[in-house]
Amino acid sequence: MSADSSLLVGIDSGTQSTRVCVFTLDGELSAEASVTTAVDSPRPQWAEQNPAEWCNSAKAALRRALFKLDVSQVAAVGSEGLVTLPHWWGIRFPEDIPHARGATIGWSNRHTSRHLYRSILEGVSFELKRMTMGLEKSFSRSVLSDIRAGGGGTASIVWPKILADILDTPLRVNTQSQATALGAAIMAGTGAGKLLSLHAGCAWRGLWALTCSRGSRFRTPRLTATGSAASATAPSAVFSAGYSVGGPR
């Protein structure tokens, strides 16, 4: 944010959806959201929209955009002590604990839905960190030089930043929204001889954009537990380490 904390809101009303984008005075995109709008076709080759639909979709998109903005700029790093263990389907890796269950702890009267949302994002990110730590232990070396991300989660303004912070690794987001279909097209092009190799297709200019550099708000947690004790205490140890060193370096 600039010294002036004012924000600018742009509303783009189209025939298919209404999009709201929130920018800083430096031109940085802080949050965005869109809501689809209905198009009526009472007879062939005829299309019309209810003007009230434009207003309602704009208000809905604005609420969604401001909610995202609040999550990234109001809910503090560490969600003010609210911790979520995202074990909705048990723990699959690096431990195999199918009967593990998720939980959100640390609730107080100051917490809101924004804190819960960020707490979930942080919890999932810490689980990904534990997975990479498990892989590094298996390979006896670092397995991450940078992260290539795609899909719906990358549409979030705040989650890629949280991932880069917790994994302490630069994160690149696919500039194409349909990453899976793009991968299939690259494989087809390679098989048909239109591309020299899969690597050549993945190296298309502008395909990846550096979104977040190495984290500065979370330091990499280091687990000291070993053996069976590590399996039982790893989730809480990771969260404890993350919150104890939270904040700028």
Image: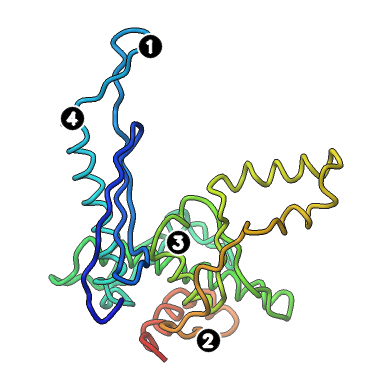
Other residues around mark 4 within 10 Å, as few (<14) / some (14–19) / many (≥20): few
Tag nearer the camera, 4 or 3: 4
Type of residue at label 1? Gln
Tags 1 and 4 touching, CB below 8 Å: no
State the residue in front, 108 or 75.
Answer: 75
Which is nearer the N-term, disc 2 or disc 3? 3
Image vertical order of residue 163 relative to residue 34, above or below: below
Q: Where residue 180 appears, x then y in whole percent?
A: 61, 45
Image vertical order of residue 98 relative to residue 3, above or below: above
Colour approach in the figure: rainbow
Type of residue at label 4? Pro
Tags 2 and 3 touching, CB below 8 Å: no
Label 1 and label 4: CA atoms lie apart by 20 Å
Which is nearer the N-term, disc 1 or disc 4? 1
Type of residue at label 2? Arg
Type of residue at label 3? Ala
State the residue in front, 133 or 70.
Answer: 70
Residue receiving disc 3: 100
Residue receiving disc 2: 222
Residue receiving disc 1: 45
Picture residue at 31% right of the left edge, 45% below the top = 12
Label 2 and label 4: CA atoms lie apart by 56 Å
Label 3 and label 1: CA atoms lie apart by 56 Å
Quarter of the picture containing the N terminus is bottom left
